[in-house]
Each structure stands twice: as C-alpha cells, then as structure tokens.
Image (spheres, rainbow, N blue to C red):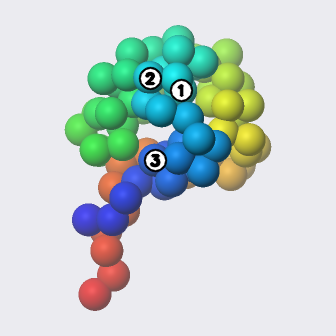
Amino acid sequence: MGDSELKRLREATGLSQEALARLIGVTSKTVSNWERGTNPASLTVPQMKALCQALGVTLDELPDWFGPTPESE
C-alpha cells in the first residue's frame, strides 16, 4: 500500500497529526486511523472547512478516501 493522500497533503503543509487534529477538532488518533485506512472520515461541515483551510485545498481537491492508496504493479 502507498501513503495516504491525506498524509501527503498534511506533510506538504508541515503539520503533524496532532496539529491537524487540533485545527479540525478531532483527536490525533482519529487522524492516524484515517491515514491508515482503519476508519472512514466522518466530518461536520465546519470540520471539512477547517480541514480544507489547514491543508490549503478546496473541497473538490480533498481525496474521497483518506486511507492508503493501492500501489500500482
């Protein structure tokens, strides 16, 4: 499995899982679970707006799945 798109976006902005979690009102464990694909994201509209702002992307640019991407063979 490849890295998650959420992880790539988060790291590109220089945010730790803890910092991103604080900005959007979830726990760092939640962010970790999303990035590992353990749990699907379930966010409120204000949290989605905060996530977009924190990552510097629009809603359309957010990945549909936050977990790891399958590696191409």
- x, y percentage for residue 9? 57, 49
Query: Badges 3 and 2: C-beta atoms under 8 Å apart?
Result: no
Looking at the image, is mark 3 or mark 2 earlier in the sequence?
3
Q: Amino acid at mark 1?
A: Leu
- x, y percentage for residue 6? 49, 46
| Residue lying furthest bottom | 73
- x, y percentage for residue 34? 36, 37
Residue 3 shows up from this direction: yes
Residue at the image point whose x is 73% and y is 31% from the top: 53
Q: Label 2 to label 1, Cα distance in Å? A: 6 Å
Report the residue marked by disc 1: 20
With respect to residue 4, does 15 lie above or below? above
CA neighbours of label 1 inside 10 A, class few (<14), some (14 to 19), many (20+): many
Using the image, tell me which numbered label, if any, was put on residue 7. Answer: 3
Q: Of 51 and 43, which appears nearest the observer?
A: 51
Q: Is residue 36 left or right of residue 12?
A: left
Report the residue marked by disc 2: 18
Secondary-structure class at tag 3 = helix
With respect to residue 4, does 24 lie above or below? above
Looking at the image, is mark 1 or mark 3 earlier in the sequence?
3
Q: Is residue 16 left or right of residue 50?
A: left
Q: Label 3 to label 2, Cα distance in Å? A: 12 Å
Residue at the image point whose x is 70% and y is 25% from the top: 49
